[in-house]
């Protein structure tokens, strides 16, 4: 199987064209040599991939026939990435802002749901009977006439 198709089929890249672009940029290699998209992958090959400033290493256990589900990936490859690279990845994820800063831009869908939940819980605790609440203002207007 071609390496671009292999990387797509084991879900390392979202599309095959993205995998081919990364290979053209020399971010994928087998052993010590950079490869082309047409390079055939064999069982036992160790593929080095540079993605998100992390150097991943995967060992090919089995070649899939086509794109496989995420749960089946571990049957086809073994992750042999260095522990230092994995620690670097963890640190990068922790250092990134998970969510946008408060007050920047429009509220997201999550923000709107949170606001709705807050308003609903606040109103439900204060006013249980809306007719009584609005009925008082009608009585005041009626008495003024």
Image (cartoon, rainbow, N blue to C red):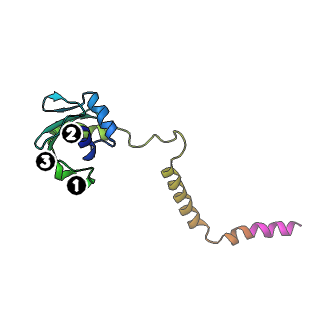
The magenta stretch spans which residues? 136-145
> Looking at the rendering, which quadrant does residue 59 occupy?
top left
On screen, 127 above or below 31?
below
Tell me if mark 3 has few (under 14), some (14-19) or many (20+) residues whose alpha carbon lies within 10 angstroms of its own.
Answer: some
Quarter the C terminus occupies: bottom right
Which circle's residue, 1 or 3, is located before the other in the chain? Answer: 3
Which circle's residue, 1 or 2, is located before the other in the chain? Answer: 1
In percent of the image, x 61 and y 71: which residue is there?
Answer: 128
Q: Separation of disc 1 and disc 3 at Cα? A: 12 Å
Between 42 and 82, the one lying in front of the other is: 42
Tell me if mark 1 has few (under 14), some (14-19) or many (20+) residues whose alpha carbon lies within 10 angstroms of its own.
Answer: few
Q: Secondary structure at mark 3?
A: loop
> Looking at the rendering, which quadrant does residue 36 occupy?
top left
Q: Which residue is mark 3?
A: 61
Image side of residue 13 versus residue 57, left or right: right
In percent of the image, x 46 and y 40: which residue is there?
Answer: 101
Between 66 and 122, the one lying in front of the other is: 66
Q: Separation of disc 3 and disc 2 at Cα? A: 25 Å
Quarter the N terminus occupies: top left
Picture coordinates of residue 64 (x, y %)? Answer: 20, 50
- The answer to whether marks 1 and 3 mark residues whose Cβ atoms lie closer than 8 Å is no
Q: Which residue is mark 1?
A: 72
Q: Secondary structure at mark 1?
A: helix
In percent of the image, x 56 and y 58: which residue is there?
Answer: 119
Between 67 and 81, the one lying in front of the other is: 67
Give the number of the mark in front: 3 or 2: 3
Picture coordinates of residue 65 (x, y %)? Answer: 22, 50
Picture coordinates of residue 50 (x, y %)? Answer: 24, 33
Outermost residue to the left: 44
Q: Which residue is mark 2?
A: 87
Image side of residue 50 versus residue 31, left or right: right
């Amino acid at each position: 199987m071609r390496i671009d198709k292999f990387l797509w089929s084991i879900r390392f890249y979202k599309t095959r064209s993205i995998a081919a672009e990364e290979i053209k940029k020399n971010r994928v290699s087998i052993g010590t040599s950079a490869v082309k998209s047409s390079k055939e992958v064999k069982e036992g090959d160790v593929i080095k991939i540079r993605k998100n400033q992390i150097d991943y290493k995967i060992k090919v256990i089995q070649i899939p026939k086509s794109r496989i589900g995420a749960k089946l990936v571990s049957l086809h490859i073994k992750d042999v990435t260095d522990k230092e690279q994995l620690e670097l990845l963890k640190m990068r994820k922790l250092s990134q802002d998970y969510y946008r800063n408060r007050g920047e831009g429009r509220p997201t869908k999550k923000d709107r749901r949170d606001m709705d939940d807050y308003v609903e819980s606040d109103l439900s605790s204060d006013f249980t009977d809306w007719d009584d609440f609005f009925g008082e203002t009608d009585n005041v207007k009626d008495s003024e006439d």
